[in-house]
Image (spheres, coloured by chain):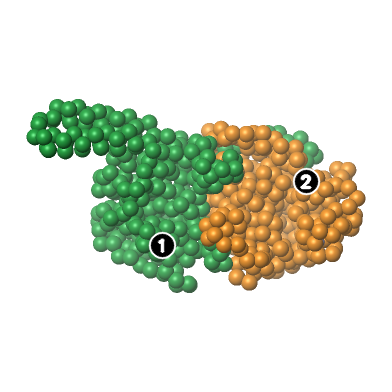
Chain colours: A green, B orange
Amino acid sequence: MRNGNSYSMDFEKPLRELERQIKEIELFAKEKEIDMSEEIARLQAKEEALKKKIYSELTRWQKVQIARHPKRPTFLEFVEMIFTGFLELHGDRLFRDDPAMIGGLAYLDEIPVTVVGQQKGRDTKENIYRNFGMPHPEGYRKALRLMKQAAKFGRPIISLIDVVGAYPGIEAEERGQGEAVARSIMEMAALEPPIIAVLTGEGGSGGALGIGVGDRILMLEHAYYSVISPEGCASILWKNATAAPQAVEALRVTAKDLLELQVIDEIIPEPLGGAHHDPEKTAQAIKEALIRYLTPLLEYPAGRLLAERYEKYRKIGFFEEIEQPEGNI
Amino acid sequence: MLKDLFKPKPKYVTIKRPEERGIQPGQPEKKELPDGLWVKCNNCRQIIYHKDLEGNLKVCPKCNYHFRLRARERIAYLFDADSVQESNPGLISKNPLGFPEYEEKIEKARKKTGLNEGVVTGVAKVQNIPCVFSVMDFGFMGGSMGSVVGEKISRAFEYAAKHNLPVVSVTAGGGGARMQEGIISLMQMAKTCQALNRLHEKKIFYLSILTDPTMGGVFASFASLGDIVIAEPGALIGFAGPRVIEQTIRQTLPAGFQRSEFLLEHGIIDMIVERKNLRETVARLLRFHQTEEVSREEVSADA
Ligand SMILES: [Zn+2]
């Protein structure tokens, strides 16, 4: 079991308090052998109402906390629930196998696909092995190798993104982290099969985009996607990493924000309180969306998919054009 | 709505040589290179006579430290006199997220640099060989890439693909993607990178020159992807910022980490070229990749 119980989210404290009260009364009633079911039912109704209220009014920062929840389903758990017959393939053929990035073959219903994604650890030991899900260059090179293999055999590509960022370390720089991410972005843009990317948790900047170029970009309700880590932005603007809640307000990082900015295509709803409350239900919602989006894309005539993918990114940008008087430069 | 703003046909404005605009080619930016008779070298701390520095392409005559250049200076040093035509100079940023103080920062950068945005693009010649160019200006919000920078670079790549012209890109983007435009900036990485595929399809030469500093989202996109990648000596180049790495690994970074020489040693760039040799090297590479088609191509304002 993961050490998720110690992960506390302040905004859930009133709920935890209510849950504690209910348990106490239940215990008391059992001990004293008195019927307190009316009181318990009243508190449970209160709990339900409070849940709905809290989870429908989540701030951006609270969503980031849910996206980072240690019990949030990781790549392998989602793969297990969404696909069948997953077969992991290893290595970038250049340096080593990066455990922070996973790729392999699977069936989405009857459709053979290639799946890639970052893998966070489910406990401290695994997190160390997985480098907290932060890939090195060889991770991006492995993912790209497998995606190019998919292209060779005309298999659609599904990318499940959950990464705080590509690893910032000495060896990562020595082996060309920038180039690895850049090349993956460029080549994904030109891969022939349909590509669907789903942001399932954290969408940490270039580390997310490195496997995130696609025909359709979907996002779980409480996932976030940002150009810079909330803490990094806070350190720059507020000179203090603890200003991360203000930073995410300014950066607009939630699924709702990204849908409004037309960077993503759809928000996949999560169970009340977040994916960790019902991983299976979340996975089924992802699977349904994947099939719904992939099916029509499979019918696209050659050329149309790549042309539309190009246009999708080509039009992202906000600017205006002013008359520039000649010589005034 | 966005589509309406996109004008595929670039407009050109002739850039006057700095001399013609009544300023010296190397007119210094106060903060980065104090104006006056004398300048202190950032590296060797020696006092240099200002004119000596200007006469030496802003390279310290004593220790070979390469001072940062403004985009206009770079253009003046690199391209043939009177060959430079700028494209899309009038593209200006909006504030898509309503990010605090973004407009003010842009306004300050415009005043400081005399540019509307952090990159100058267009067509020019190097020793009479035509090319499309893109030169970033670190003085404009740290050479960061927002919508306008991404758009201008994408248009430049597309123009080069359409007209069979090689591309010379000079980057100096310290912060990478521009934080103030959030996710829109991140997407400029995809936008610029995908345009490179068009150059690849048409077998067009793309030369990327990395100057101090080229980091983050600029390095992790088009800057890394040159057919040939050159760096100036001593430039800071990398994916993650040195401070972020230090905080992550809780170690002091070794001397020379993420400098051009480190990148060359680790196989990430093709070569280091000193500023005094850069023009000659660029011309040599352009000439080497010149095809008949390219040499026949007329580069004109209405192309
Ligand atoms: Zn010096």
Q: Compared to A149, does B132 lie above or below? A: above
Q: Quadrant of residue B297?
A: bottom right
Seen from this angle, which residue lies furthest front?
Answer: A32
Left or right: A273 as drawn, with respect to B143? left
Give the residue at x 88% y 47%.
Answer: B36
> For the residues marked 2 and 1, what is the alpha-carbon distance in whole angstroms?
44 Å
Check the picture and name the quadrant holding the N terminus of chain A.
bottom left
Q: Tags 2 and 1 in contact by the CB under 8 Å rule?
A: no
Residue position for label 2: B31
Which quadrant contains ligand 1?
bottom right
Q: Secondary structure at mark 2?
A: loop
Asked whether A58 or A82 is in front, the reply is A58
SS category of the residue bearing label 1: helix
Label drawn at residue A128: 1
**Residue shown at the point (77%, 60%) measured from the top left:** B43
Chain under label 2? B
The kind of residue on which mark 1 rests is Ile
Residue B124 in view of the camera: yes
What residue lies at 75% left-to-right and 47% top-to-bottom? Answer: B85
Residue B229: x %, y % from top left: 64, 64
Chain for numbered disc 1 = A
